[in-house]
Image (cartoon, coloured by chain):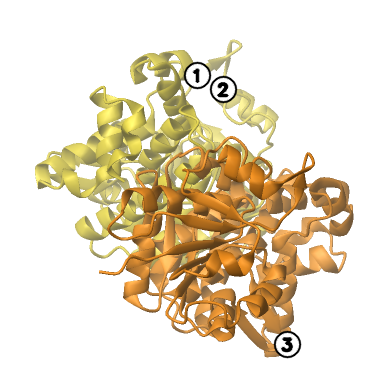
Chain colours: A yellow, B orange
Amino acid sequence: MVKESVAVIGSVYRGSVAARIAGQNALEKTDLFERDVPMWVFQEQVEGRNLTDIINEKHENVKYLPGAKFPENVIANPDLIDTVKNATLLIIVIPHQFLPKTLAALKGKINPNARAVSLIKGVEVVGADINIFAKVIERELGIRCSALSGANIANEIALEKFSETSIGYADRKDGEIFQKLFDRPYFRVSIVEDVEGVSLCGAMKNIVAIACGFNDGLQWGDNTKAAIMRVGLLEMKRFCQEFFPSCKDATFVEESAGVADLITTCLGGRNRKVAAAHAETGKPFEQLEQELLGGQRLQGTGTAKEINEYLTHKGKVDDYPLFKTVYEIAFENKPAKELTSRL
Amino acid sequence: MVKESVAVIGSVYRGSVAARIAGQNALEKTDLFERDVPMWVFQEQVEGRNLTDIINEKHENVKYLPGAKFPENVIANPDLIDTVKNATLLIIVIPHQFLPKTLAALKGKINPNARAVSLIKGVEVVGADINIFAKVIERELGIRCSALSGANIANEIALEKFSETSIGYADRKDGEIFQKLFDRPYFRVSIVEDVEGVSLCGAMKNIVAIACGFNDGLQWGDNTKAAIMRVGLLEMKRFCQEFFPSCKDATFVEESAGVADLITTCLGGRNRKVAAAHAETGKPFEQLEQELLGGQRLQGTGTAKEINEYLTHKGKVDDYPLFKTVYEIAFENKPAKELTSRL
C-alpha cells in the first residue's frame, strides 16, 4: 500500500488545529501516512522574525494558536507550491476570500490524484448560482473534495477537550481516509455521504447565530433563544433540501455538523457576540466589526446577505422568514426587536 | 355552540403560568370559553393568611409566581372537587408524586365528557411497564388526555417573553381546542398527533440536562456540551421509537417539545445546575438537593433511575450509553469525568 502524504493549506486558528491533529495521527499511523505534515503559512513577521521560523523552532503557532504544541512532524512552510508538492491529501482551511487566489496558484501544481477536504465556511453566491466551496475547489483543481464541519471551537480542540465532527464525502474511500487522518480519542469523526449538507450547515448556522445574538442583546431569555434555534434548524434544512436535493435529513439531526454545531455557535462565538452588541447599542455592524473584531468581517451577516441575494433571484425570500428578518435587521435598519414578529 | 369551561389543577410555578394564559384567553375568546377559570391551590399559609385569599385579593400568586398579575377571572380555590365541578377542559399541572392521590380524589367527580391536558413531567415506571402521565390520567379518570410540553421556562413566560410550545393530541379536536386555550401572541402553540412523543421528550430531556451539568461542572466547554446534546437527542428519539412506536420523527426535530426544550433545559435550569455542583464538588445528589433545592427532588436523576430500571427489565441498558452513564454517575459513584467515555 502506498502511503498518503498530507499537506495543510492554512495555519490561522482552525488551520493550526487541523495540522496539529493530522500531525498526531501521521506520527502514529505510520502504515497509512508519510511522517511529515507540511503546513502552508502566509508569511508574516512576529517580533521581527518570520512566523514560519518561530513555528518550526518552538513547534507552536505563537500568533494564532498559542499554548498548543505541534508534534515535531508539522513543518511550517511559507511557499504554497513547495508545501503541496508531494501531497496526496490536501486539507484546505483558509478564509474564503483568499480562496480564488490560492486556487489559481495551485492549479497545475498539485498531484492530479490528490484528494482534498475543505474546512472553509460559507458559500459562493453569484446571482442565481450558489456553490459550496468544496465544489469550487473541485471545479478549479479538478480533484475530488470532501468537507469537514462540526461543533468545533478551535481553542477547545487545541486543549484536547472532547469534540465531534462530521466529514461529508462523495466517494466513500475519501471519507474513510480523511476519517483516519482526523479521528482522535478527543476528536471523534463520523462520515456521511453528503458533502453539500455538511458544508451548508457550516455556513448557514452563522445566520441563526446572528439571530441568537439579537435575542441575547435584547435579553429575551432562553425560551425565545430555543425557539429561534428550532426555527433556524428547520430553515437550514428546508433551504438545503430545496436547492440541494441530495442533502440528507440525518445530516441536520444526527450529525455534529448539523444540530450540534448550531448549538455551539449559538451559545458562544463572534457572530452571536457582535449581533448582541448591535441589538444592545444600535451601532451598525460595520462599526462593530471595527470596534470588536479589528475590522475583520463577520461570517453570519455576510452569509445572510448572500443567501438573501440568492433567494431574491429565486423569488423565495418570504419562504424563509428567519433568514429574511436577520437580513433586514443587519442591512435594512429593521429594529432587532422585530426578530420574532414572523415566527 | 356550547362553551367550554376550564379548570386548572395546580398553581405552583407552571400551574400559575398556565392559569394566567388560559385566563387571558377565556377573557378574550368569549364565544369559546366560559369567563371564569378556577384554579385549584393546595392551601397553605403565607404570612398568617390563606394563600387562596391572597391570590383572589391581589390577583397574583405571591408565593409561586410573584410579579405576574392574573386576569381577574382566574379564581383560586382550595377545594379540588369544587374547582372541577363545571369543567369540560382540565389542565393538570402538579408534581407527579401527587398525581395518584389527586386522581383518586377526582374519580367519579368530573364531567365524564371532559378532556384533559397534562403538563406533568416524567414517566411512570413499574418494573417492565412504562407509562406517560397522560395515559395514567386517561386510565384513572376515563377521559381523553393530551400533553403540553415545550421550551417553557415559567418565569420567562410570566414576563410574556416570546415562547413556543407543543401540544400532543390523540383526537385532533382536543388538540385544536387546547391550542385555542393556550395560544397567545407571546406563546405560540403548535399541535401534533403524538401525545407520547411530546410527553416523553419532556421527561427525558432532563437526563440529558444532568449530563450537560456534569460537562459544565468539569468545565469541558461548548464542543463537548453540543456533542452531549446531539447524542442525547438521538437516544431520546431512539428510546421513544423503540418502546412507543407511534412517536413521530418530527416531534423530536421540528417541535418545541423536542429539540428546543432540550436546548433550553441544557442551557439553564435546576437539573443542569445541581449536576454541575455534583461534578465540581463530588457531593452526592441527595446532599445537594438538601443544600440547593431545600430537599426537593431533582427530576433528571429520578427519570434516569426510572429509565434505567425499565431498560434493565428489557435487557437494553447498553443500547443507551449516555442514559446509562448518567445513571452510573448519579447512583453508582462513577466519576463524572467518564461521561464521554462511551460516546
**Secondary element at tag 3:** loop
| Residue type beneath disc 2 | Leu
| Closer-to-camera residue (B83/A44) | B83
Q: State the residue position of label 2.
A: A51
Residue occupying the point 85% across, 51% down:
B288
Residue occupying the point 86% across, 69% down:
B332
Q: What chain does badge 3 belong to?
A: B
Q: Left or right: B40 with respect to A212?
A: right
Q: Are marks 3 and 1 in contact (CB under 8 Å)?
A: no
Q: What chain does badge 1 belong to?
A: A
| Closer-to-camera residue (B188/B328) | B188
Residue B224, placed above or below residue A44: below
Q: State the residue position of label 3.
A: B127
Which mark, by number, is residue A44?
1
Residue occupying the point 60% across, 24% down:
A53
Residue A27, placed above or below residue B242: above
| Residue type beneath disc 1 | Glu
Q: Which quarter of the image is occupied by the C terminus of chain B?
A: bottom right
- Residue A3 at what x, y percent from top left? 52, 61
- Residue A289 at what x, y percent from top left? 41, 19
Of pointers 2 and 1, the one earlier in the residue sequence: 1
- Residue B277 at what x, y percent from top left? 80, 47
Q: Which quarter of the image is occupied by the N terminus of chain B?
A: bottom left
- Residue A337 at what x, y percent from top left? 36, 29
| Closer-to-camera residue (A256/B128) | B128
Q: Nearer the viewer, mark 3 or mark 1?
A: 3
Classify 10 Å Cα crowding around label 1: few (below 14), some (14-19), many (20 and above).
Answer: few
| Residue type beneath disc 3 | Gly
- Residue A171 falls in which quadrant of the image? bottom left
Q: Are marks 2 and 1 in contact (CB under 8 Å)?
A: yes
**Secondary element at tag 1:** loop
